[in-house]
Image: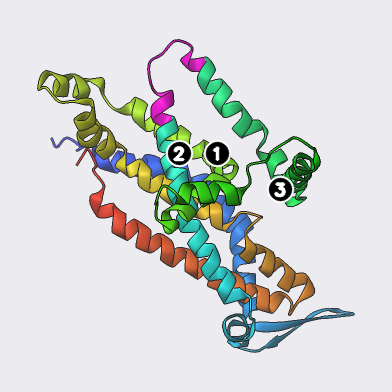
Amino acid sequence: MRTKRRFRLTLRQRDSVYGYIFIFPFIIGFILFILAPVVQSVIYSLNSLAMEANGVKMTFVGWENYKYATLVNADFVPQLLSTTGAMLNKVFWVLVFSFFAANLLNQNFRGRLLARTIFFLPVVVSAGIVLKLDQTDYLTGVAYDTIQTAQNVPGTSFLSGQILMMFLMQLRIPLKFLEFVAGAVDMIPDIINASGVQILIFLAGLQSIPGSLYEASEVEGATAWENFWMITFPMLSPLIITNVVYTIIDFFISPSNEVMQLIRDTTFFGKGFGASSAMLWIYFATIAVILGIVVGATSRFVFYHDR
C-alpha cells in the first residue's frame, strides 16, 4: 500500500510565502485605492481637459502635454536637473550622519536607553512642526531679525558668513570643498530631520550582527578598524541600499520639493491637469531611472551572509 508523500516547502520557499503574506495588504490596497488614479493620470496626460457645466471634457492630444513639459515650459527641466543634483548631495550627507549616529547609539554605555530616547524624541515630535515653520518661512524671518539686531546694537560683533569664508580661505583649502562643506552645514537641520528612519534601520542592522564574529576576529588579532571594514560594513551593506532607496524617494516626494511645487502650480494656475499629469509621469520616470542606476551600481558590492 502506497503512502502519500507529504508536500513540504523548502526554507527559501517558506520565506517567499511569508514575504507575499507580508506585502498582501499593500497589494490589495494598491488595487482598490491606487490603481484607478494611476490609470486616470495616464489618461489625463494624453488629453486636454476643460471644465464645462456638465462635467469635464477631455480632448485627445497625444504627446502634446509631454512636449509642453520638456520643450515649452521653461522651468520644468531646469528645476528637475537642479532637484536631482540637490538629491545626490542630501542623500550622501543623510547616509553619513545616520550611519555615524547609529554606531554612536549602539555603543554600550550607561544610560544608553535614555540617550536614544532623547535623540529620537525631537525627530518624531518636531517633524511636522519644523515642516510648517519651513513652509511659512518663519525660521528665516527669526534668523534675519536676530542678525539685524546684533548688527544694530552698539558694541556687539557678528561673525557673518563672508568673514568666516575669508578666514577659511586663509587656510588654503580648495574653494569647491569649502562650498561643499558650507552647504552641508546649512542643511544640518534638514539632515537631522530626514535621518530618523535611516538611523533606526542602521541601528537594527548593527544589533543583528552576531557578537561571535567580533570575538573570533579579536582572537585572530584584528583591530577595531579592521573589524569595521571586514565585518560591520559588509554586514550592513544590504541596509545601505535600503536607506539609499528610502532617502531618494523621501526627498523626491517632499512637499518642499521645487518640482512638486511647480507641478502643483501647473495644475491649478497653469495649463491644467493634462500638462501636470505629463510632468508627473516624466518625474516618475526620472526617479525610476535614478533608482535603477543606483541599485544596479551598488548591488554588486552587497554582501549577503546567507548566500
Residue 119 placement, left or right of 271 = left
For the point 49% across and 70% down, which residue is it? Answer: 285
Residue 138 placement, left or right of 255 = right
Residue that protrudes farthest toward the top in the picture: 110
Between discs 1 and 3, the one toward the N terminus: 3
Residue that protrudes farthest toward the left in the picture: 220
For the point 45% across and 46% down, which residue is it? Answer: 93
Q: Which residues are magenta?
A: 102-113
Could you say whether the residue bearing mark 2 is in a helix, strand or loop? helix
- Amino acid type of the residue tagged 3 in the rendering: Asp
- Amino acid type of the residue tagged 1 in the rendering: Ile
Circles 2 and 1 in contact, beta carbons < 8 Å: yes
Circles 1 and 3 in contact, beta carbons < 8 Å: no
Q: Which residue is mark 3?
A: 134
Q: Which residue is mark 1?
A: 192
Query: Which image quarter is the N terminus in?
Result: top left
Checking the image for residue 85, the label placed there is none
Q: Is residue 164 above or below residue 41?
A: above
Q: Is residue 20 visible?
A: no
Between discs 2 and 1, the one toward the N terminus: 2
Colour convention of the picture: rainbow
Give the image quarter of residue 68: bottom right
For the point 62% across and 59% down, which residue is it? Answer: 257
Which percent across, then down, holds residue 287?
Answer: 48, 64
Residue 1 placement, left or right of 24 = left
Checking the image for residue 97, the label placed there is 2
- Amino acid type of the residue tagged 2 in the rendering: Phe
